[in-house]
Amino acid sequence: MRRSIQSKVTVVAAAALLALTACTTDPSIENPPAAETEGGEAATTPAEEWFDQEAFDEQSEQRSASFIGDPEQPWLQYLEGEMTDTSEFASEGAKKVCFANASISNPWRQTGWITMNQQLEVLQEQGVISQMETRDAQDDDNTQIADIDYFIAEGDCDAFIISPNSTAAMTPAVERACETGKPVIVFDRGVDTDCATTFIHPIGGFAWGIDTAEFLVDNLEEGDKVVALRILPGVDVLEQRWAAAEKIFQENGIEATDYFTGADPTEIKKIISDELATGDVQGVWMDAGDGAVAAIEAFEDAGKDYPVMTGEDEMSFLRKWEETGLTGLAPVYSNFQWRTPLLAVERIFAGEEVPKEWVLPQTPIPEEERADFLASNEGMPDGHYAKFGGTDLPGYPEVWQERQIP
Amino acid sequence: MSTLAPDRKAELRRDRSPRKDRLLRGMRTPGGAVFLLLLVLLAAVIFVNPSFGEPGSLIRFIGRTAPIAIAAIGQYFVIVSGEFDLSMGSVVTAQVIIAGNLIGQDDAKVLPVLLLMLVFGALIGLINGLVTTLLKIPSFIVTLGMMLALLGLVLYWTGGAATGNPADSFRQIGRGGIENIPVLEILPYPVLILLAIAAGAFWLMRRPYGRTLVAVGDNARAAALTGARVWWIRTRAFILSSLAATVAGIILVGYAGVHPSVGRGYEFTAITAVVLGGVVLGGGRGWVLSAAAGAFALEMLFALLNFAGVASTWRDTVQGIIIVAAVAAGARTWERRRRGASSATHDKQTPIAQPPAVGANEGGK
């Protein structure tokens, strides 16, 4: 009796398992049209998670807002808003700055890191900063938490600069740095606390998504197909770019399919070739310009017309864009923001007030301005970013051309 | 074989099963079944997306899959000899970076750097092989160490970012092709390179080296007792694997361009392709062209998922399930064959010769 129950259970379990495996594989193969609509829906859910109407509207307005400060020095410009009083920090003498960096593992961060070091040189000569101790967390939350705690405990720091690796994980560590009573400057990615003296960042991901999606909508017709190439899921600045763009595509009847590429050109080429084999693609949207050239080459290899395309202000894209003459836009995630934290340190120790949230301008490069940026960045490597904002710094242009990474 | 007397040779020919039977039997092994799988997948892809079946699209697909197939052929040599090569992906990445950094826009440097890359590839294979065989460290660990060492080197050299693409003449190898060909439109160079390498590998596996390599993978001890220099045979397999990775890298520079992410995960794609091709992990069984077919089946599967519109977030999961299922099915078939079940029940037995009489020395010598 007992044995028969056991065997029955086994049979039922095996049948269930079979049914399960059948479910997971079958729909994708036997039922393509259904799978396609499912795909569309599945792709919207994560984007909705990241969508925030209030931030979307705010950033949309900020794109056309007027910034305070000299437009020749966009890295010092900011939007009107709450200011932090720093008179308590006013003091003489050169200060030691401690910088907890998330990583320099992509060309955007490398370009910024070079610029930051040239800015440091200037401030050291002026006697504002004695030295900057940097710890590179190599894209690891735990390493960065340890780095920040090390700085707090034995860094002998006068000020902290933190470029967080991720938002939630870094929040407690940033709060601990704030508790020391020394100035804390956060830039690029944000944290869930407003304890920092200033938080420096360009307008944001939604603004990027709005700029790029509106450009594609303006240059395409309803029903056109756009392939969206995304680097990786789960990073707020990138997810917000796509969340905004996807919303605008949907509202304007543009059919957009998104893929994660890991910025791998092989993957990008494969995706585009497959899409081109299925049907025509009229537009390409990217959440970062890394790999844009591979995407364009895929159209060349397939012998198809160039798409309308948004890349980034990376030199490789600007050059390929000019060479091919395609209709394009280079959105910018202002690389010059890497200068701002050190200049903020200067202001803070001078007792000058700084914006609580230091929103820097973020203006895309349209075709009319492309030639200027190509000229001012002549000789720069492909991984360089046109709006790096370091033309007035010592070492320009050799240091950036030779990629002298300290 | 060559020592067989002429009449024995004729006997062998006579006793061999008819070609049709042999083909059928071959199709029932995992190594043969992968070709059927490939055809089924191709039919499915064309069903979902008819334009894929056009000769121009197909040849481009073969061209872009060529580097993976070449890597799979390289990996086959190592796996069939009973080892692993996990350093393959990093070799590809390192070679891509070398090409980007050393060639630059200077056409004159193309040939010297190409030679340097091949020498560098062979050197990596030699180190992998010698450390594995002479120091008796498992190849899993040796090549894992090599993978990390090379990745570190690349990171140190580039800081993790691309420097720029090399001269177009070099990239033509992976991007260009013979144009104006009827029907196909273009015959990509990677397809020609793949054909040459596949033919070379096929030939090599029928040479004494190939036979011994499989024997070493099946039972290294027995092979050693027959006088095979196991360490040198395996080391050469590692060199072949690294050279294959180098060729894949050369093609990828052209096809995709220089980026530190090129080659990422190649070792696992190659191993999956080899296993999908019915080659047994642990060595001793499998056919080299099945490994290449495995690479095509794998890429065809990915294309199918793509065309079927599986959401990007689900693709990896579906791929994983299908791969595990395919490998499990393959392993079970071999297991059954090992026990002799399938050959006993399904195959007509054609004895090669009269069993020797008890006490007689076989062959009469």
Image (cartoon, coloured by chain):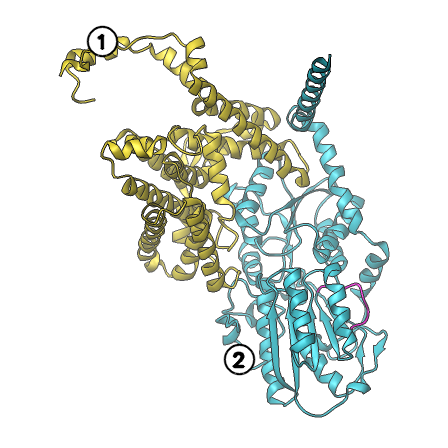
Chain colours: A cyan, B yellow
Circles 2 and 1, Cβ within 8 Å, touching? The answer is no
Which one is in front, B208 or A86?
A: B208
Q: Residue B358 got which mark?
A: 1
Where disc 2 sits, the SS reads: loop
Q: Is residue A396 left or right of residue A312?
A: left
Residues drawn in magenta: A189-197
Q: Residue at x 66, y 61 (%)?
A: A142
| Outermost residue toward the front in this view | A2
Q: Residue A125 got which mark?
A: none
Q: Is residue A371 visible?
A: no
* Figure check: B29 above or below A391: above
Q: Is residue B127 left or right of residue A181?
A: left
Q: Nearer the viewer, mark 2 or mark 1?
A: 1
Which one is in front, A174 or B74?
A: A174
Mark 2, residue position: A395
The percent position of residue B125, horizontal first and vertical second, equals 35, 48
The percent position of residue A376, horizontal first and vertical second, equals 57, 72
Badge 1, how many Cα within 10 Å: few under 14, some, many 20+?
few
Q: Quadrant of residue B326?
A: top right
Q: Quadrant of residue B282?
A: top left
Say which amino acid is labelled 1.
Val
Q: Is residue B24 magenta?
A: no
Secondary structure mostly seen in the magenta stretch = loop
The percent position of residue A109, horizontal first and vertical second, equals 61, 65
